[in-house]
Image (tube, rainbow, N blue to C red):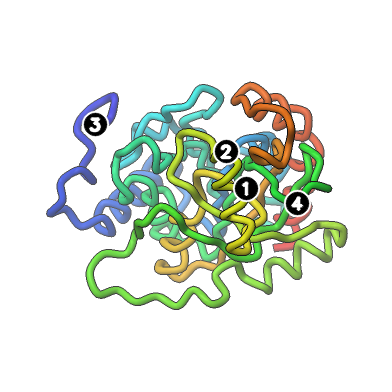
Amino acid sequence: MSHTAVNPLDDEHADPFAIAAQAAEQLRDATGVEHHDIALTLGSGWAKAADLIGETTHTIAATDIAGFSKPALEGHVGTLRSILLPSGKRALVIGARTHYYENHGVRRVVHSVRTAAAAGASVMILTNGAGGIKDHWVPGTPVLISDHLNLTANSPLEGATFIDLTDLYAQRLRDLAHTVAPELDEGVYVQFRGPHYETPAEVQMAKAMGGHIVGMSTALEAIAARQAGMEVLGLSLITNLAAGISPEPLSHAEVIDAGKAAEPVISALLARIVAQL
């Protein structure tokens, strides 16, 4: 259950889209902003980008908005920020990601994305910190997500809802990112359930299946964004080499440290990409 009160998304008979619409309405009331054009979920290492893309006019505790959960992870800030971009457009920055491993159910994992869509956003930028399988990726390398493997054995789609995922991580947006940073590498993101890190054998499995980046978020959110009609841009910060690729054991502290070290560089990169949107 949520740390504050019962979350409306926990009622299996509730309509998650109606709750997202309610959340978007509460967001409008709290900010006075009618329409957000793009949304960003800032994962490990990416948070500083919020300060660089424009002027934050409103910061709201996510738990004040229907359906949002308190972040389970230290280092994750539970806020929603409305940012006025230099172009005059509006960005909604989601600093309140619910991870699949928290076992709150997929509806709560993708609620922020559905709320962003209900608030008007047509572009969803999903970022994360993740492990790298390509051994030339040093910690601190930003990588574009070209596609994903969803190994959660779950989906945010309910019932007979068939959504085409051919161009899920939009080629148009990746091309645009490459105009800003031609050196950006691309890779296939693999979402595992977590919260344990992958074993070396699981990393080799992901590699054999065509994966390059391993993590515990993003894929389910991307599917929900596509269902909502949004274009998706995915970016991973390689915080460490994945288990067995690196001789060192993995630690959450290492992930946080790599994120902090890379933060100024990747945040500036993301701000330049957002400016191009």
Q: Residues within 10 Å of mark 3 (few under 14, many from 20)?
A: few
Q: Residues within 10 Å of mark 1 (few under 14, many from 20)?
A: some
Residue 118 in view, yes or no: yes
Q: Is residue 190 left or right of residue 73?
A: right
* Numbered badge on residue 134: 4
Instruction: Identify residue type, mark 3.
Output: Met
| Nearer-N-terminus badge (1/3) | 3
Disc 1 to disc 3, C-alpha distance: 34 Å
Image spot of residue 177 (x, y percent):
76, 62
Disc 1 to disc 2, C-alpha distance: 7 Å
| Nearer-N-terminus badge (3/4) | 3
Residue at (66% x, 41% y) in the render: 242
Disc 2 to disc 3, C-alpha distance: 31 Å
Observer-nearest residue: 268 or 234?
234
Marks 1, 4: nearer the viewer: 4
* Numbered badge on residue 1: 3
Q: Tell me if label 2 and label 4 are in contact, CB under 8 Å.
A: no
Marks 2, 4: nearer the viewer: 4
| Nearer-N-terminus badge (2/4) | 2
Residue at (30% x, 39% y) in the render: 104
| Nearer-N-terminus badge (1/4) | 1
Residue under circle 2? 57
